[in-house]
Amino acid sequence: MLRKSWTMLAAAILLAFGGGSAVAEKQVLRMAYWTGPSHQMVQTLAAWIKTIEEASGGNLTVELDKAALGKMEAQYDLIKNGVRDMVWAVPGYTVGRFDLVQAAELPLLCPNPRVCSPVLWKWYTKNGLAEKEFTDTKLITTFVGGPFLIHTVKPVKTLDDVRMLKIRASGPSLPGAKALGLNAVPLPPTEVYEAIQKGTVDGAEFPWEAMPSFRINELVKAHLEVPGGLGAPAFVIIANTKAFDNLTPENKAALMKAGGEAGAALIGKAWTAADERGRADAKERGQVIETLASPELEKWQQLLKPVTDEWIAKAEKKGLDGRKLLDDFRAMVKDASS
């Protein structure tokens, strides 16, 4: 009888401490990406992963792939189908699915990623939009890349100058290029270097950071900056729903603490720093940097207005007040910029 009592007591103790060990369970998520391993975002992801480990007390880590897995447009399905647990994805390449988060991509809206990345997260979640769009994956954070400008093999100052050239524009940069009447050539970022080298295109719409990231700084000679940008690429970090659900409550909380607004701010700052390095590199190379000025800018604003109107119409088709949402976004950007 005494032996049985000791056995029951030992079992109770093990059960009690077993619950504690479940809380401290060490778990690993596998994360994919789509650029080359030297892209600045890969280093930024490594820094972000450290904040996850810190938030979880070392109980949750993320193993980042050593090389790109799949093309940019395939990333969302990789996660939805459980090929990887997490990924950095581009909503604009899943056409028609993520119209609301793509508000961040509208032209003349975002001055830089440092400002707009945390604003995008706050605006998107405050208005309950994540639940409407990310229904089959778990949204961890949102952020934006640098504003699009035009990089060319020869200097341009006006819209007429740019229209004489073949300009790479794809995904988030394509609507603005079409609205401006550019001779747009859709290409993924990884194919632009070769296209410029062969003369297939004469330039590209890209943020500054893309110049060294994709080695385009070796080929172009001039850059035309547009205040507020010709849009900015919206990005997300998403997790496979099952992989997220399998995390302990503590590890879920740690991941969302490192994600959300904090993750958006960290990544936005890193992206802005990469833009600044790209611009500094152009200056060091003696390349021409022009800024679009009035009244030329006013001409571009009028031509780009239909892009904004189209987003408002898409939001309204979803039963939302698109103009009110966009006014709210603009007000939040203005506040964050001041």
Image: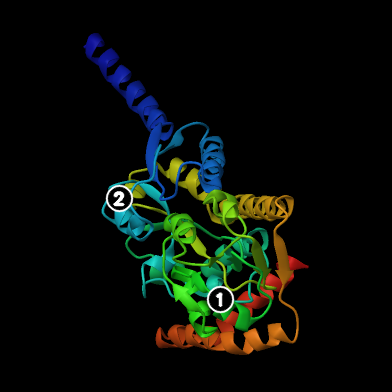
Q: CA distance from mark 1 to mark 2?
A: 33 Å
Residue 127 in sight: no
Q: Quadrant of residue 23?
A: top left
The residue closer to the viewer here, 1 or 159, is 159
Q: Which mark is residue 242?
A: 2
In this view, 178 is above or below 251? below
Sequence-first tag of 1 and 2: 1
Q: Label 1's element?
A: loop
Q: Quadrant of the C terminus?
A: bottom right
Q: Is residue 50 left or right of residue 85?
A: right
Q: Is residue 118 left or right of residue 204?
A: right
- Could you tell me the amino acid type at mark 2? Lys
Q: Quadrant of residue 211?
A: bottom right
The residue closer to the viewer here, 167 or 312, is 167
- Residue 69: image x %, image y %? 34, 47
- Could you tell me the amino acid type at mark 1? Leu
The residue closer to the viewer here, 120 or 105, is 105
Q: Which mark is residue 106?
A: 1
